[in-house]
Structure formats: C-alpha cells, structure tokens
Amino acid sequence: MKIATFNINNINRRLPNLLRWLRSAKPDIVCLQELKAADPEFPAQALAEAGYGAIWRGQKTWNGVAILARNAEPVPVRTALPGDRDDHEARYIEAAVSGIVIACLYLPNGNPQPGPKFDYKLDWFKRLRTHAAKFLKQDLPVVLAGDYNVAPTAADIYPTRSWDKDALIQPKSRAAFTSLLEQGWTDAIRTLHPEKPMFTFWDYKRNRWPRDAGLRLDHLLLSPALAHRLIKAGVDRKLRGEDGASDHAPAWIVLR
C-alpha cells in the first residue's frame, strides 16, 4: 500500500500536474493540502475519471484538505481537528481507507512570529497531540500525513541563516513536533533515510529549486500498529521541476 502526502498549492491550477503524477506514481492513498478552492470547486469528477474517490474540506482562497483513495471511497470520520469550536480554517480531515485511519493535516504556518499567528500554530499543535494520543491509546493503525510547516532539525533545511526568524524552524515549533513523536509516532521518511536531506519544499523565490535550497516540511507519521509495516519511503522530487509546479513535492511511503 502506497500512501502519499502532497501540498498541491491550488488544486485546480495544478490539476494537470496532479493527474500526471497519479497516473505515473499510482499511490493508493493521497493526502492533499492547500486546495485553495471552495467545496463546490473541488475537481471530484476529474479525479473520479482518474480512478480516485475523494473526500475534502475546501476553503475559498486559502487552506483546504482532501483524502484520495485509488479505486475506493474514503469513509469520512471527521472534518475538523477537535479542541476549538471557533477554529473554522479547513486544515484537518480524517477518514478510514482499507483498514487504516488516515489523518490529513495542514498545520498553520505561524508567521510572523512572535504574534497571534505563531500562537495559533502552537495551539494547533497542542490540539493535534491531544487527538493523536487517543489513537495510540486505542492502538489503532493510523497515518498522520501532511504539511506540518516544521523543519524538525537542522538536517531538514539547507545550510543558511536566512530562515532564522521564520516560524518553520523556531525552537518552539521543533519542540512541538518532537513532543508529538515522543508519544510513540514514527517519522517514516527520516526512519528509512536518516542521512539524506529528503527536502519536500523549495520556495519559488531566490532560485531555490535550481539551487536545491529546500526544507523538509511534509511528514508521514505512523502509529506503532503500523510502523512495523513500513518498507519504503521517498520524495518525488521531479514533480517540483515541472512547468506550473507546486512549491512542494509529494512525500510517500509503502506499507507491506
């Protein structure tokens, strides 16, 4: 079973790129972030014609998350992260697919920091940890996949000082990610590739893609009930170099 996460950065604008990748990579499950489309604008028909059932929670202009399943229909579980009834941003969706719970998430960016947006990021992380702990208590097979907007360590960003004040690499952001792992989650990409950069994001600015000046922001975390099934993991970097590409590339895992 191949499971991927991909910040698509506007699903309708990047739909040709997405469909080409689905045809070539053939992932069984895909978590998408940054749809940048309201619910009625989601290209469900085009994805169905490509062989993928889908559930989604859109949002006009910003955010938006979706779960795709190859030759299957994801069974919706929830469309929001618990813990704050006043949070209406489309950043979390959860479904059951082929006996696995798939949580697709798009963590807040947090910039500028310090400030309310960074506080929101840390609070969202806290809510995620609370919800994730329930999965572990029930010993469920779960994948927490998405754009976490955190480069967890210095190994997850190219050598630079230009991001030092950015929310993506702040000590509190990294500590929040570490504290999630310490619950018992396995960082699949880093587990199988402990030495390689495995970047998933290259900003459009300052020629960062040609320079391979990237960050690893997109992660697939596995619960203990799934971690022993992990056999492969990678990043489809080529997609980032296509015309009209997202600034992210898909990260993926294969479970036996």
Image (cartoon, helix red, strand yellow):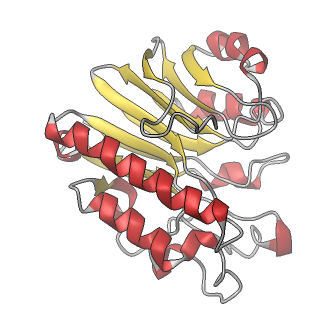
Name the quarter where the N terminus is drawn.
top left
Quadrant location, the C terminus: top left
Find residue 101 and report its horizontal and vertical position in percent.
Answer: 33, 28
x, y percent for residue 20: 70, 31
Q: Residue at the location (66% across, 75% down)?
A: 166
Residue 149 visible here: no
- Name the side, left or right, on which 207 lies relative to 9: right
Q: Is residue 244 left or right of residue 123?
A: right
Q: Looking at the image, which residue is at 39% across and 57% down?
A: 189
Q: Is residue 43 above or below residue 80?
A: above
Residue placed most toward the observer, 44 or 196: 44
- The image shows a total of numbered marks equal to 0
Vertical arrangement, residue 64 with respect to residue 117, above or below: above
The location of residue 126, given as percent across then percent down, is 40, 54
Q: Residue at x 34, y 54 (%)?
A: 188
Point out residue 96 in the picture as x, y percentages from the top left corner.
Answer: 36, 21
Q: Is residue 202 above or below residue 157?
A: above
- Please state if 129 lies on the left or on the right of 149 as rendered: left
- Would residue 120 be seen by someone viewing this image from the given angle? yes
